[in-house]
Image (cartoon, rainbow, N blue to C red):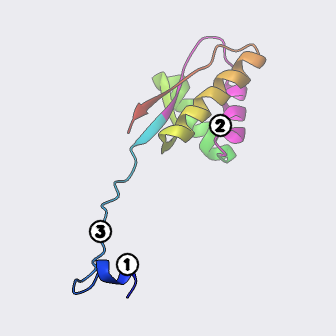
Amino acid sequence: MSAVDREYEGGVATEKKQKIEKPYLYKVLLHNDDYTTMDFVIMVLETVFHKNSGEATKIMLNVHQQGIGVAGIYVREIAETKVAIVHDVARKNEFPLKCSLEKS
């Protein structure tokens, strides 16, 4: 008998079940300002968040009328990346569009 066989001799090997928790989800929010155009917000929603034209328009109107709109809900790492991309695209296009995330 090998050392491995002796180690388990007479015992029953059981597999421990690990409880895997789902990661928290985060809302990516777009905030209204007086300078960013509606067309630019729609473009961001279509290109960064892959929304169709109708969805993008609806979210843009929420941003415009309510001051804030939910662009998407993602795990933290993806949400943080989306925020960074929005800020980068806005800065390159000289818009002050603010994007943030909050726990869903």
Amino acid identity at mark 2? Leu
Residues rendered magenta in the picture: 28-50
The C terminus, quarter of image: top left
Where does label 1 land, which residue? Answer: 3
Where does label 3 land, which residue? Answer: 17
Q: Are marks 1 and 3 in contact (CB under 8 Å)?
A: no
Where does label 2 land, which residue? Answer: 45
As helix, strand or loop, the secondary structure at mark 3 comes to loop
The N terminus, quarter of image: bottom left
Amino acid identity at mark 3? Lys
Of callouts 1 and 3, the N-terminal one: 1
Residue at (31%, 63%) from the top-left corner?
Answer: 18
Residue 100, how many percent across, how many down?
A: 50, 25
Amino acid identity at mark 1? Ala
- Residue 40 is one of the magenta-drawn residues: yes
Q: Quick one: 76 or 52, which is closer to the camera?
A: 76
Of callouts 1 and 2, the N-terminal one: 1
